[in-house]
Amino acid sequence: MPQVLIVDDDPDLLNVYGSLQPGGSVPDVRVLACDPGAPADSGPRAIWLHELLSPSRLNLLLAGESYSAVAPSAWLGQLQPWRELISVHQVTPVRDPEEQFRFYRAFGDGQSLVLVRPDLYVSFAGGQQALPHLLTWLNTWFPPAPGGDRHVRRRQLAGRLRRV
């Protein structure tokens, strides 16, 4: 399964998106995480990133400074065809200086999208404006299943991951 990194043409923006690049492993940092669409009163929870990520699904991390700017609700609608294959999490740094340093080194200090495989390696990375590229990537590797058969989609994911 090919990996894709989408950044702007400006080389200075590479620092904004951090060191995570396709093919690289995701570090285990403490984050504040919440799931998009969760009730507003549930609030973020502090958790180790590796504990948050599902070992049986692709994981989309929406990383940034705040929850409100990271995941507009329109994004979730665009990701709907792949929701049975992807767990979506919003992550921000915890309030520990050492963990913040590790978070920003990995994710950068801008809004970023990082698609993580179940084996904790990055498949896709880009800034907030890269959502159309992510949708193209998902449609290329996981096209809509005929008749919406969820079992076909799961077999697609399993088959693709075995080839990596």
Image (spheres, helix red, strand yellow):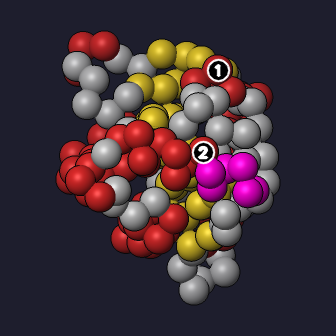
Quadrant showing the N terminus: bottom right
Residue under the point 46% across and 60% down: 142
Task: Specify whether residue 74 is in view.
Answer: yes
Res. 158 mark: 2
The relative height of residue 68 versus residue 140 in the rendered view (above or below) is above
Name the residue tied to disc 1.
51
Of 136 and 71, nearer the camera is: 136
Residue under the point 73% across and 39% down: 119
Task: Specify whether residue 94 is in view.
Answer: no
Amino acid carrying label 1: it is Glu
Of 18 and 35, nearer the camera is: 35
Counting from the top left corner in percent of width and height, residue 99 is at: 71, 29
Tell me where the magenta segment starts and ends, as one range. Answer: 159-164
Location of residue 18 (image quadrant): bottom right
Amino acid carrying label 2: it is Ala
CA distance for labels 1 and 2: 21 Å
